[in-house]
Amino acid sequence: MMDVGRTSKSLALKEPLALLGILYLDRQVSLADRIVDPLRFVLSLTAEIENRSNLRGRPLSRNIFSRFEAIEPRILGSWLQTALEPCPLEGFAHWFSSRLDELGFEYPYDTPSSLSRLVDSLFANRFPTSILDPACGTGGLLAAMAERHSQAAVLGQEISPEAHAWAQLRFLVLGLPNVTLLEGNALNDAASDRCMPDGGFDMILTNPPFGQQIEADRAMPPHSPKLGVEFVGRVVSETAYVNKIADWLSSSGIAAVVVPNGFLSRAGTDRKLREALASTDMLQAIIGLPERLFAPATAIGTAILILNRRKPDDQRGRALFVEARGQGARDGNRVTLTDDTIERIRSRYSDWQNEDGFSQVVSFERFDPEISSFSPSAYVKQSITTEMNPSVRRARILELDRQHAILSQQYEALRSKLDQSG
C-alpha cells in the first residue's frame, strides 16, 4: 500500500497520502471495485466513510478529495492498483501520521513532530480528563496527547477548512474515538465554550497563528475574568490566544502555548498580560526553542509558554526559564529537536533545577520592572564553555549567507537606479 508514493514519484504528495488513508479505513475493498471508474470509486468510498463516521459537512469530500477530479484517470487508476495490492498494515497508522507532519502545509497549520514529542514528554505524568487545542491545524500536537490519554475527552478546533479535514482524516486513521474536532475560529466562535467541561479544561496545548491583528471586542471579552487585563483596539493573535487559554483553564489546569519571541518582551498589551501571568502566579515556565524550527515556512524564533493554575508549593512565586535556542540538529531546511535535547528539557522541567547555560529558576521579583521580560536569555547565564551545536552553527551561517545575498541584490538594484537617475 505504501508503495503508492513511489508510483506518484513523490512521497510528499497530498493526494496519494489521502488515498492511502481512506483505503486503510476500508480495508475490505476488492481490486475489481475500482476498475470501471477510479474517480467515482474514490469519491463514493470517501462519502461512505464520512457517513459511517458521522462527519457533518463532508469535510473530506469538500476539502481534500474534491481535487481528485483534476487527476488523470490513468494516474489515479495506477495509484489504486498499487495501493490495493496485499501488504502488511502493521504500523501504517503511525506511518500515515508521521507523513502528514512532513507534507509542508502552509504555516501555521503544520507543527513539527519533534515539538509535539517535547510537549508530550513535559506532560507525561499528568492525568487530565479533558484536553483542548483551540488551533489544532492538522492535529499533530493534539494526536500525541490523545493517544497517551485515551480516557480523556479531547477537543480540537481549527479555522482552516483544509487543515481541519486533514486532522479529521488523521484521527480516523489513528482510530482515536475520544477526539472531537470543530471547524471555526476559537477566538470568536462559541463552539469551544459550549463544549468546555464545567470548571474548564484540565490541559490545553496549542501552536496558534502568530502576528495577526485582531479586533479585541470581536476576539475576546473586554475584561479577562482570571487575569484582570482589559483589551481595547487591536490585539495580536498570539496575545488573544494566551488570554483566552488562561480563562479556559480549570482551577488545576495546565497549558503549553507556542509563542513568537516577540511576545516575551513587547510593550503595551503584551506587557500587561505578562505582568498578569506573573501576579496571578500562573506562569510556570518559558522554554526558548531553536531557530528555524518551523522552517522553511518561517524562520521566526519561538518559545513554549507553560501556564499552571495549581503550581507546587515550592514553585510558587517563581518560574523556570530554559534556554534551548542553541540546541537541535539540522534536518533539511529546518532544525529539529533531537531526543537528547527533548530529554534534557524534560529533565530540567521535571526536577526544577538550575543548569549553567541552560536553565534558571527565577523569582518574579527579579523580573525587569520596565519590560517584565519573559525571554530566557535575560535570566539564563551563558556558560563560557558552552559550544554551539555544529548543525545549528551551519544553519545560522547559511541563514546569514542568504540574508547577505538579499541585501546585496537590494544594494545593487538601488545603486543601478541611482546611476540611471543621475
Image: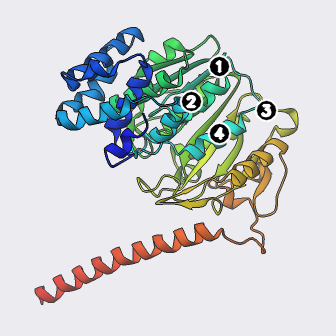
Q: Is residue 34 above or below residue 241?
A: above
Q: Residues within 10 Å of mark 2 (few under 14, many from 20)?
A: few
Q: Position of residue 351 (x, y in %)?
A: 85, 44
Instruction: Inspect the image, locate mark 3, and give the three-letter code of the amino acid beneath it.
Output: Lys
Instruction: Inspect the image, locate mark 2, and give the three-letter code of the amino acid beneath it.
Output: Glu
Instruction: Inspect the image, locate mark 1, and give the three-letter code of the amino acid beneath it.
Output: Ser
Q: Residues within 10 Å of mark 4 (few under 14, many from 20)?
A: many
Answer left or right for 194 relative to 420: right
According to the picture, the residue beneath numbered tag 2 turns out to be 90
Pointer 4 or 3: first along the chain? 4
Pointer 4 or 2: first along the chain? 2
According to the picture, the residue beneath numbered tag 1 turns out to be 150
According to the picture, the residue beneath numbered tag 4 turns out to be 119
Q: Position of residue 95 (x, y in %)?
A: 52, 37
For the residues labelled 4 and 3, say whether their Cβ atoms are less than 8 Å apart: no
Q: Tell me if I can see residue 71 in this picture.
A: no
For the residues labelled 2 and 1, say whether their Cβ atoms are less than 8 Å apart: no
According to the picture, the residue beneath numbered tag 3 turns out to be 311
Residue nearest the observer in this picture, 274 or 394:
394
Foreground: disc 4 or disc 1: 1
Instruction: For marks 4 and 2, give the CA distance.
Output: 26 Å
Quarter the N terminus occupies: top left
